[in-house]
Amino acid sequence: MTKFLAQNSASRFSNLSLQPASGRLNQVFLRMGITASLLGALICSGLAQAQNNAKAKPVDFIVAVVNSEPITNNEVQNLKLRLEKQLQPGTPAPSSQVLAQQALDQLINEKSQLQQARDNGIRIDDTEVDQTELNIARQNQVSKEELYKRVGLEGLSVNAFRDQLRTQLMISRLREREVDNRARISDTDVEQYIQSQQAGKSVTSNQLDINLAMILIAVPENGSDKEVADLKIKAQEISQRAKRGESFTTLAQTFSQASDKGANGGEMGLRSADRYPTLFIESTQSLSKGDVTDPVRSGAGFHILKVLEKRQSGASNVLIVQTRARHILLRMSADLTEAAARARLLTYKQRIQTGTDFADLARQFSQDGSAAAGGELGWSSPGQFVPEFEEVMASLRPGQVSEPLISRFGAHLIQVMERREVPLSIREQREMVRTQLREKKIEELYSAWVEELRGRAYIELRDPPQ
């Protein structure tokens, strides 16, 4: 089902969202990967118009010049207003002066990036803006006309909305070229990170799971020195035989004087380290799987220990939720509009609810390669499908059928069949580490790049007129 795999090469704006409530337009751009600094500028022009409809527009003035482009006081004040609205309820609000400075800094950063994008020849044509609008609308299951209505509630005209989308697309394209493509994480980086994490963890009960096998050569409570010495020699001989490759299980069953008489080959079971004597953990701390200790003396006698398994707690217990689902796909065309596809899928859903088998309908009507398998997509992990598809799938209970969904591929009807929790493999865990390291590196590179870009720009700050 490769056509539904998440595609990094697709528009990075494919998972935009627009909430209908006034004041939530910022969610669109935050999910686009646009920073808050760019968000404020995106809405300020339209918001200013909406705010000033009922009152005379105040006299504006220039507060800064970036190279040859001005930043006005109205821009700063409008972005400041947006920053205030973005504060979480109960969060201490910065002073008005601090917010104004943050707004000015963000606008300066945006100006310098936009100028650099133009200098690098980055252009965004109308087709790309159209596609971004369409992705936003489809993600939110609305038409373009409804999208424009909701944008209007935020104070943006259609033209202003499209112009600012174009601006943010240019800046995002520049960031991809100048920053994202430089954030490479090697296998060595991943390995060093894992080792550093492990080095920072002591081998304690809540960090280590271990499975040991034991042979006990008991020492009488009042044994003489000669008896103890003879028993130590015996234990050393058994240890050497085990180290040479003799079966530890056989040796345990033959010689162990533990309470279980070496049953199960002396195996004590996988458990957290705090459930073993400290002496055992200290004796095996530097050993690997399959290694055998020299005899270890305790009050009970001499112990020969073999490491059967050792792992960091949770190292193989990182669980993810997988979903097994199926779908029916209808592709839009000149003969099948989006509205018609939705209506057709609704009739399929009604038939399913009255007893028709989902798989039969998928085989008959679905236009996806999975149709022959009754629409089954197999077990999928988070991130495997495009966001608009996965978001709806994740909201369904097993057995539940979705409402018609529009994605970049067409119209879908989804049914979740079952879910399960599965552990991530070592390879998958390493890829998670790689992704985390890359995201961190991108943010570090981006911050440094913005500072460098700003440092190269001519910035003039101006006092307000008296």
Image (cartoon, rainbow, N blue to C red):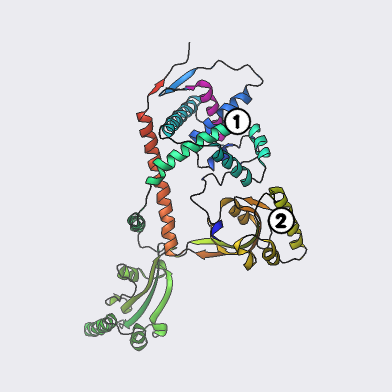
| Element under disc 1 | helix
* Residue that sits furthest to the top in the current view: 466
Whether residue 155 sits left or right of residue 357 in the image: it is: left
Inspect the magenta stretch and tell me whether residue 159 lies in it.
no
In the rendered image, the vertical position of residue 55 relative to residue 394, given as above or below:
above
Res. 419 in view: no
Nearer to the camera, 45 or 8: 8
Separation of marks 2 and 1 at Cα, in angstroms: 34 Å
Q: Position of residue 151 (x, y in %)?
A: 63, 34
Q: Position of residue 71 (x, y in %)?
A: 48, 23
| Element under disc 2 | helix
Q: Which quadrant would residue 284 be assigned to in this image? A: bottom left
Q: Main secondary structure of the magenta part?
A: helix
Whether residue 382 sits left or right of residue 400 in the image: it is: left
Whether residue 38 sits left or right of residue 203 in the image: it is: right
Sequence-earlier tag: 2 or 1: 1
Q: Position of residue 124 (x, y in %)?
A: 50, 37
**Which residue is painted at 40% across and 21% down in the image?**
460
Q: Circle 2 is placed at which residue position? A: 345
What amino acid type is highlighted by mark number 1? Asn
Q: Which quadrant would residue 253 be assigned to in this image? A: bottom left
User: Where does the magenta region start and end?
Assistant: 71-86
Nearer to the camera, 142 or 336: 336
Whether residue 403 sits left or right of residue 284 in the image: it is: right
Local crowd at mark 1 within 10 Å, few (<14), some, or many (≥20)?
few
Res. 194 in view: yes
**Which residue is painted at 60% across and 17% down in the image?**
57
Please state the total of marks drawn on the protein image.
2
Q: Circle 1 is placed at which residue position? A: 159
| Residue 51 numbered tag | none
* Residue that sits furthest to the front in the current view: 334
**Which residue is painted at 27% across and 77% down in the image?**
295
